[in-house]
Amino acid sequence: MIRSLPQSKTYAFSFRIYVIFYFTFLFAPLLVTCILAFNNSQFPSLPWKGFTLEWFTASLPERVGIFHDQINLDSIWVSVRVAFFVTLLSVCVGTCGAFLFEQENFRFKQFLYFLMLAPLVIPGVILGISILMFSTTLGTYFEESWNVDVGLLRPGFWLVVLGQFSFISTLVTLVTSARLRKFDRTLEEAAMNLGANRFEVIWYITLKFLRPAIIGAGAVAFLMSFENFNTTLFLVGSEATLPINLYLQVRDGSTPVINAISFLLITGTSILALANLYFSRAKE
Amino acid sequence: MKKKYRWALLFFLTPVLLWLVLLIVLPQIDLFIMSFRTENDAGKMVWSVANYLNFFDEPIYWLTFVRTAIYSVLVTFLTFLIALPVAFYITKVVKPKFQGFFTVLLLLPFWVSEMVRVYGWMILLRESGVINHFLLRLGVLHQPIEMLYKDTTMVLGLIYTSMLFMIVPLISVLDSLDNSLIEAAYDLGANMWSILFKIIIPHATPGIVSGSIVVFMLTLGNYLTPNLMGGKNSLWFTEQIYNQFIASFNWNQGSAFGFLLLFLSSIVVWLGLKLSKQTLGKVVK
């Protein structure tokens, strides 16, 4: 059964085969995507026609590599900006949330905590449409009552940021809370005895303690925002984010440029993930 | 002293309240209200349940709804069946020094965008895809077959997308299972199946429940995978919502659909928690 018990040959063998199959299942689509980014062919499929970097670097009439593909480059830039603002906002609000639920006491705290968890159980599509509708309702209200047109409330960059922020904050709150729970509060008392006020304590002591959790949560928030599709789909305006843009291209037939982008994304996120893991291990 | 504490409370409470009220509570209420509004013959908006009646009158709507629900349950169950042995292998069978390596390897694909993962499956499975190419080469097939745009492929894609959210809670719950329990059962002559059903599964129940809830919810609300891998026949309920919002521009009908989906997902989450006697707060941790 387990490693401390004797096990039959067939048992060990079949278990190993199963796990090999599982990892093949897990990695096959990603590997194939990466390999075909270097195939010298007009379509992302086999047969193999030789190695080329043209899907990255070329700027020919029939073949535009990713480094010269303005539409895709633009959408990457949009995604980076969205992810930056989502990370900034959700880290600030999520840290406030962690302090609120771990260190403060007030009426309806349980209820508010439950509400804070709600975005985890609301499907992303529903978050998207409800925010789209509410902002339109608000927009119409402003226009009819005060005759002002609030551009912020129409589908576009900032609405995407708000939509993604609405559920990523929950995640940041949970990660930061978990770390804050381990904090030794006698340190705060000591600082207060020495004459620090509450905000000085938080700034100089508690936030320093929370830093690894905040950085980790920020990295996860950035990635989640960068990759989000379901919520973004309904809020996006004229500036498409990368996943939306890829979706539109894949739906209408694909070229190896998409493989090239995927290759960059896969290597990029793997490096980020491994770095995150390495630093969190090193801290422990 | 007391007064200062209140200031801190206010400082932390304000952003959290703004976030939850403006982006979660009010939009959901708006969704609920809009789903009960409809245009009457004179072109004015009035209160009515017409949007919900439409849902029950048109078989395509409620059949899609039921189909989505059933497939989501199936996907959740299959994900669990596939994930359990892998989680068990990593926590209990493999040599401890490989444990960390395997865990990292397991999580790595899920850092990559869902869009890229689905795209990978598309170039593997489509008619001109890699698997067809090899099968033709090997002489198994004489004509390429279209493997994409089938229900089976869609289920496969959904399992692949949501695997992570099952395997992580399973690993953490199996990690806390004391090996001596299994050893004791083995010494007393229990076979593999009775160990599985009497020790492992009862111990793993919290992890199974939290994994299943998340997988079910994500599958139900998924748009990308059914749309790209299931094609025109996927008939996933989120597509109906998308069509009402973006294609027909009938937001009231769309909100009714959205609310029904939210209702279904909340009911299942609630049932899951009730049956396993857990609370949402605990599951999340």
Image (spheres, coloured by chain):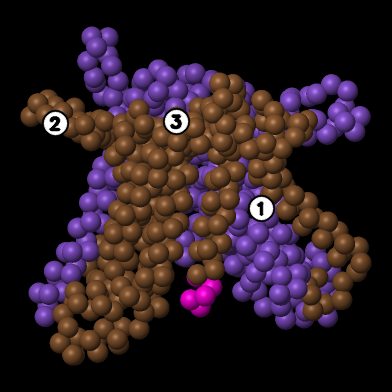
Residue for point 57% across, 37% down: A56
The image's mark for residue A142 is: 2
Dots 3 and 1: beta carbons under 8 Å?
no
The CA span between labels 2 and 3 is 37 Å
Q: In which quarter of the image is the N terminus of chain A?
A: bottom right
Expressed as whole percent of the image width and height from the top left, the position of residue B115 reads 55, 39
Q: Nearer the viewer, mark 2 or mark 1?
A: 2
Segment colored magenta:
A280-284
Residue for point 69% across, 28% down: A41
Mark 2 vs 3, N-terminal side: 3
Dots 2 and 1: beta carbons under 8 Å?
no
Going by the numbered disc 1, the residue's amino acid type is Phe
Expressed as whole percent of the image width and height from the top left, the position of residue A98 reads 32, 66
- Chain identifier matching the brown colour in the rendered picture: A
Expressed as whole percent of the image width and height from the top left, the position of residue A274 reads 56, 62
Residue for point 76% across, 31% down: A49
- Chain identifier matching the purple colour in the rendered picture: B
Residue A123 at least partly seen: no
Please tell me whether residue B129 belongs to the stretch shown in magenta: no
The CA span between labels 3 and 1 is 43 Å
Q: Which chain is home to disc 2?
A: A
Residue that carries the numbered disc 3 in the rendered image: A70
Mark 2 element type: helix
Q: Which chain is home to disc 1?
A: B
Expressed as whole percent of the image width and height from the top left, the position of residue B135 reads 85, 32
Q: Nearer the viewer, mark 2 or mark 3?
A: 3
The image's mark for residue B80 is: 1
Going by the numbered disc 3, the residue's amino acid type is Gln
Please tell me whether residue A282 belongs to the stretch shown in magenta: yes
Residue B88 drawn above or below residue A136: below
